[in-house]
Image (spheres, helix red, strand yellow):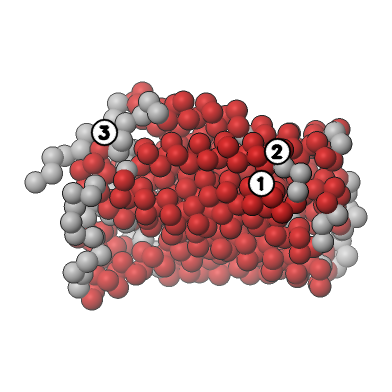
Amino acid sequence: MPTPLQEPDAVLLKRIRTVSSLGILLDGYNLSVIAVALVPLTRQFHLTPAATGLLASSMLLGSIVGGLGAGILADRFGRKTLLMGDLIIFMIFSLLSSVVLNYHWLILFRFVVGLAVGADYAISPTYLAEFAPDKTRGYHLGYVWLAWSVGAVLNFSLGAVLVTTLPPQLSWRILFAIAIVPAGFGLFLRQQLPESPRWLQYGSTANTAHPTSLMTTSQSKSLGQAWRLSLIPWFLMDFSTYGLGLLLPVLLKSTGLTSTAGAILGTGLAALCGGFGSLWAMRHLDSTGRIVLQVRGFLLSGLGLWLLAALLWMDFTLFIVLLGGLMMVNLFNSTGPGTTTGIIPAEIFPTPMRATALGVATAVSRIGAVAGVFVLGFIDSRYGLGAVLAVAGSVALSGSLLSWIWRIEPNQNALPDMKEQTVRLIDHSLLPND
């Protein structure tokens, strides 16, 4: 029988949390940096709406492949090796992105940066979850997603200064290059960390049976519920938030409601409110649970987007009101799905497939983000910003409903290590008083 796993000491746990969070901070910076960089890039390369959408989506497309591949590899070869490799790729291609002279090469390099970002999404929360104590795991994982908001706010703050003070052909290059510095620091820290003892015990290649093999029909159906909860709400969340967020500076500027600096700062303020929401969620995940926060966050953000759409349709276009509404929507989203959708897959699948599950969920969520960029961009060109907000709001409301229907609450439960433990966790969630 496997020996019980010991919890790490407080110092090691803090280092693991910091290193895992640093990777997601870089992801938050880089996944949102294109929203700022698009403002000077559209001027320098004279981008059409289709070219703008492709550039905005290139990194997201890369993260689809990165999430899928890295999750599978991390379950087979371990967490630490992949954590090192993705940062090396990230640094090399972030540097290349900052010096490229051709639009098409820029798309390719941002795609490869996306590979590394998708990999980190699959591995960092998995790695941290396998060290965190059961009773406070929500707090530690919430810390990771708070770091995403910190990275996004850092990007918009720097972007507002650089884009408005430097020539267009220089500002976006500096924005891309800055990420190399914290990535190098993170690489130095990661090489000093241990491999996950949970993976060494339960998930290494010494295990001959895959956790989904030889499952009964009822077990397969239960695992199917875990997949639905992990994939669909995160897809819907990214469709509405990334699709809207990555295009928001361009959308705000194109409406004539504000200047370039105002559009970037406005989007940054919305991201800042998202950070406050993540901070609040981080402190309530272990008391309230994941599902209640996710359902409520989807619901409130969906209703908020519909209210803003109604105001625009009534020709109420005061920028400060629109911005305030978007800030509140981002706050509501981050108190729920913006924090929980990236946590739940790391908690409800067994160790031999945990990173794979989180990688698949990451990939599906990025498909939602890419779809959001193109669909919402098309809707804006045909029907205006009000229709964009209404569609995004409807998607968020559907996320609230489906999260409740497929609910599985991992709060205060031990991580499952084998398929039998997963089934018990899922079956427990189906009891009347879950």
The residue lying toward the viewer, choosing from 46 and 419, is 46
Between discs 1 and 3, the one toward the N terminus: 3
Q: Nearer the viewer, residue 60 or 237?
A: 60
Q: Secondary structure at mark 2?
A: helix
Q: Quadrant of residue 261?
A: top right
What residue sits right under mark 1 in the picture?
32
Contact between marks 2 and 3 (CB within 8 A): the answer is no
Name the amino acid type tagged 2: Ser
Q: Nearer the viewer, mark 1 or mark 3?
A: 1
Q: Where does the image place residue 280, in percent across and percent down from the top left?
A: 53, 41
Q: Residue at position x 50%, y 36% from top? A: 88
**Mark 1 → mark 3, Cα distance in angstroms:** 35 Å
Q: CA distance from mark 2 to mark 3?
A: 42 Å
Quarter placement of the C terminus: bottom left
Q: Position of residue 60 (x, y in %)?
A: 60, 55
Q: Is residue 156 left or right of residue 256?
A: left
Q: Is residue 37 left or right of residue 349?
A: right
Q: Is residue 363 above or below residue 33?
A: below
The residue closer to the viewer here, 92 or 372, is: 92
Task: Name the N-terminal-most of marks 2 and 1.
Answer: 1
**Closer to the observer: label 2 or label 1?**
2
Q: Nearer the viewer, residue 82 or 150?
A: 82
> Which residue shows up at 57% across the image and 29% down it?
182
Give the label on residue 98, or none: 2
- Sequence-wise first label, 2 or 3: 3
Residue 136 seen in the current view: no
Report the mark closest to the observer, 2 or 3: 2
Circles 2 and 1, Cβ within 8 Å, touching? The answer is no
- Give the Cα separation between the discs numbered 2 and 1: 16 Å
Residue bearing mark 3? 7
Q: Vertically, is 179 above or below 242?
A: above
